[in-house]
Amino acid sequence: MAEKNIPYKIHLTEEEMPRAWYNVRADMKTDHRPILNPGTLKPVTADDLRPVFCDELVSQELNDRDRFIEIPGPVLDFYRMYRPSPLVRAYFLEKELKTPAKIYYKYEGGNTSGSHKLNSAIAQAYYAKAQALKGVTTETGAGQWGTALSMACGYFGLDCRVFMVKVSAEQKPYRKAVMETYGATVTASPSDTTQVGRKILAETPNTTGSLGCAISEAVEAAVTSDGYRYVLGSVLNQVLIHQSIIGLEAKAALSKYGEYPDVVIGCAGGGSNLGGLMAPFMADKLAGSASPRFIAVEPASCPSLTRGRFAYDFCDTGKVTPLAKMYTLGSSFIPASNHAGGLRYHGMSPILSQLYHDGYLDEARAVGQVSVFEAAGLFARVEGLLPAPESAHAIRVAIDEARACAETGEAKTILFGLTGTGYFDMAAYIQYNGGVMEDYIPTDEDLKRGFDGIPELPGVE
């Protein structure tokens, strides 16, 4: 079965694991627009960010010079418990699709959190511990990030306060249970525990919540609690730096067999998974040494790249965070309550937004959740893994690309990210299997309500 003696799973040794993260900003032709202080509309400084983030994470967030950033020893030690993660040749999926394409996926679900989020969570918790903080606050949507951070904080003995999007907390109680098992405090957001949460509830008492709401609450909880800082699981530059280990390992594993992807596919919510997977391959594209095609896959119900605006916007609903230039649906945008697949943030990473705007991130594709779960079911049956709904967005497009190869006869090499497992997402699978799952695609009027909240900043490009 194995072509060119390529095994089903390609494993790197511990000695082959990267010792430094890659910072794509250092190689970008045009850096993303600076994050702005909403009070002054001037680029944020380290002093602006230190009350919110850990000191070392502030440095990484603003770092546009260093191509590589050394991974601290304690973080490497923790990584060794579940990394290097396997790169898998999807032979059975190829056979099912009767495609000449070679399909690979980087599997990030082999840890208790069940996703790639642990790669950044353990780094951020380490820096908080090194700064002698008491604890951290954060938000979580589907729950992967909150789960990963609760694990990391438990490991380093930090308090962890998680604000979980209300509709996700209701749909996924087992995620909450896992977080609490690791010692985290989990609050459904918006809540009455913060000033901004009470304000949101007063204005929209029946809201199902959003990541923007949860971010507002988590930031407020951090800046009003002595010895705490806020941490985020996606979107930020620092997170994409940490997640670059995914792509660095994938590239190293492929190179052992003389392989290189023609197409790189990742699901895209805030950008952490796609940004991490594509990072070293994007370095090649920026240098002109290779030209892989990059495809970002997002849910049709939260289409920030495909239907959003490239504009400065707040990163949270309560408008307490800095302004970022990104593709956005407006900080007040809330996906439909039947949206089951995660990837529910209103904006996209400034790095990925700039790369998309400049044409280096080649394509953004929005897909409906019914077709996403159809792809998830097919993958589970032939490859033996139950994918997270987020991951299944990438699977959907990988299948579509492989089927296109079957029609044209092109033997492309396709790489996608399998961000994690779907065992905490069974309510959504039950809906799909029962034939009651529906797609919801926002109307132009729905999107206009979010766009109307994007701030107008005369003189700011």
Image: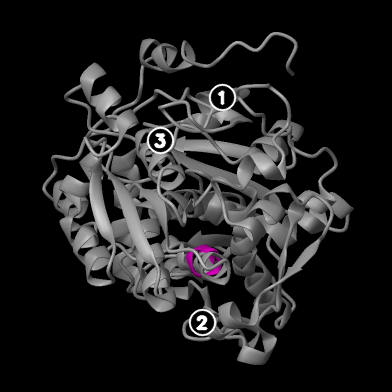
Q: Upstream in the sequence, badge 2 or badge 1?
A: 2
Q: Pinpoint residue 374: horizontal percent, then vertical percent.
A: 30, 50
Residues under numbered marks 2 and 1 in contact, where contact means CB atoms less than 8 Å apart:
no
Looking at this view, is 82 or 207 the one in front? 207
Q: Quadrant of the C terminus?
A: top right
Determine which of the numbered discs, if any, sits on residue 244 in the image. none
Determine which of the numbered discs, if any, sits on residue 313 in the image. 1
Q: Is residue 121 magenta?
A: yes
Please say if 330 is above or below 415.
Answer: above
Q: Which residue is mark 3?
A: 216
Residue at mark 2 to residue at mark 1: CA–CA distance: 36 Å
Q: Which residue is mark 2?
A: 78
SS for dot 1: strand
Q: Pinpoint residue 378: horizontal percent, then vertical percent.
A: 32, 60
Q: Residue furthest front?
A: 226
**Crowd tier of the residue under label 2, counting other residues whose Cα lies within 10 Å: few below 14, some 14–19, many 20 or above:** some
Type of amino acid at the residue the image marks with label 1: Asp
Q: Upstream in the sequence, badge 3 or badge 2?
A: 2
